[in-house]
Amino acid sequence: MMKFKSFMTMSMVAVALVFGMSSCGDDGKDEPEAPVANQVVGSYTGTEVLTVMGEADESTETFEFTKATDVSVDVTLPQYGEGMMTVPALPVKGITLTKSGNTITGKLDKYEGTVISADGSEKAYTVSDVTVIFNDKTVVMTFTQKYGNMPFAFEGVFTGAKK
């Protein structure tokens, strides 16, 4: 009888070990995906083309996308121009992101802010019609910006690759 109890106890331990060490099919594939903003934050270097009244100016720039929330990013448009005609860097906040397959798209209808100009005065600006498309390690961003009392808006297109 003692041998039977010992055998049963050992059998129960063996069964517990077998079930305790077996997997339920979870081999890391079901890990939660990182928030969409985390997937795109970083520095992207490429070509920015600003067009106003049919005149285009092309330059190499770096755009830094930072996480605002799990589903939105901020970016600062780089400064351009010279001397008193310099337009300072323009922060754009709250670009809402959505994901479809491997493509992440950002949209923002309008962002308004103020910055300090080259002459030290505070100037208002508006960035509107923002569309950002992230695919793998590349980004394409289109936007319209109006700075201070400038009579015309600049149309911008940035195409870059993640550093």
Image: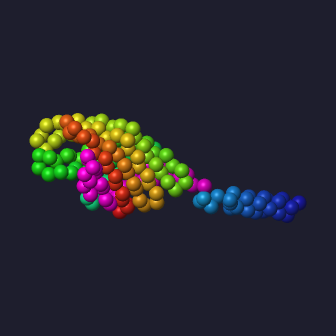
**Residue appearing at x 44%, y 54% in the figure:** 134
Q: Along the line of sight, which residue is nearer the eye, 102 or 37? A: 102
Left or right for 163, reference 3: left
Whether residue 20 is in magenta: the answer is no
- Colour style of the rendered protein structure: rainbow
Q: How many numbered discs?
A: 0
Q: Position of residue 79 (x, y in %)?
A: 22, 50
Q: Is residue 43 above or below residue 116?
A: below
Q: Is residue 122 above or below residue 87?
A: above
Quarter of the image for residue 14 reads bottom right
Q: Where's the N terminus, which quadrant?
A: bottom right
Whether residue 36 is in magenta: the answer is yes
Q: Which stretch appears magenta?
A: 30-58
Q: Along the line of sight, which residue is nearer the eye, 47 or 152? A: 152
Q: Is residue 79 above or below residue 29?
A: above
**Residue appearing at x 42%, y 60% in the figure:** 137
Left or right for 137, reference 17: left
Left or right for 51, reference 138: left
